[in-house]
Image: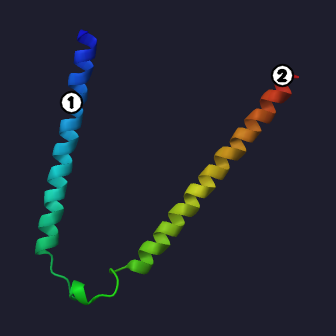
Amino acid sequence: MTDFSNSMLSLAIILSSMFAIVGVMYGLLKYRDATVKLPVDREQLARIPAYGLQQQIQDLQLDLMGSMMMGLMMLHILVDALISTLRS
């Protein structure tokens, strides 16, 4: 029972520190959003600044994830073929 209580205590410490850090980050971001001065009024913008750049970055991220998944699948196929060759 002491192992369970020790593990729960360590989990509680880790989670509480994580929530504390997230809370500080949230407060800092809210403070920055309240005090930042933009060259244009945000309400007048039709879309957020650097919208096109964000779309390009997201497209590249999806391409990278697709390539990584394709590489993993090819590696899996290669390992399966190698194992089946070694067994026979």
Query: What is the x, y in percent for residue 52?
Result: 44, 80
Between marks 2 and 1, how big is the CA–CA gap? 48 Å
Above or below residue 85? Residue 5 is above
Looking at the rendered structure, the secondary structure element under dot 1 is helix
Where is residue 80 shown, x and y percent of the image? 76, 34
Q: How is the image coloured?
A: rainbow
Above or below 31: residue 42: below
Residue 16, percent across and down?
18, 37
Residue type beneath disc 1: Ala
Give the class, few, some or many, for how many residues have Cα within 10 Å of label 2's Cα (few <14, many ≥20).
Answer: few
Marker count (numbered): 2
Q: Which of the 4 quarters of the picture holds residue 76? A: top right
Label 1 sits on residue: 12
Q: Read off the residue under disc 2.
A: 87
Closer to the chain start, of discs 2 and 1, is 1
Q: Nearer the viewer, residue 15 or 53?
A: 15
Name the secondary structure under disc 2. Answer: helix
Label 2 sits on what residue type? Arg
On-image quarter of the C terminus: top right
Q: Quadrant of residue 38?
A: bottom left
Q: Residue at x 33, y 81 (%)?
A: 49
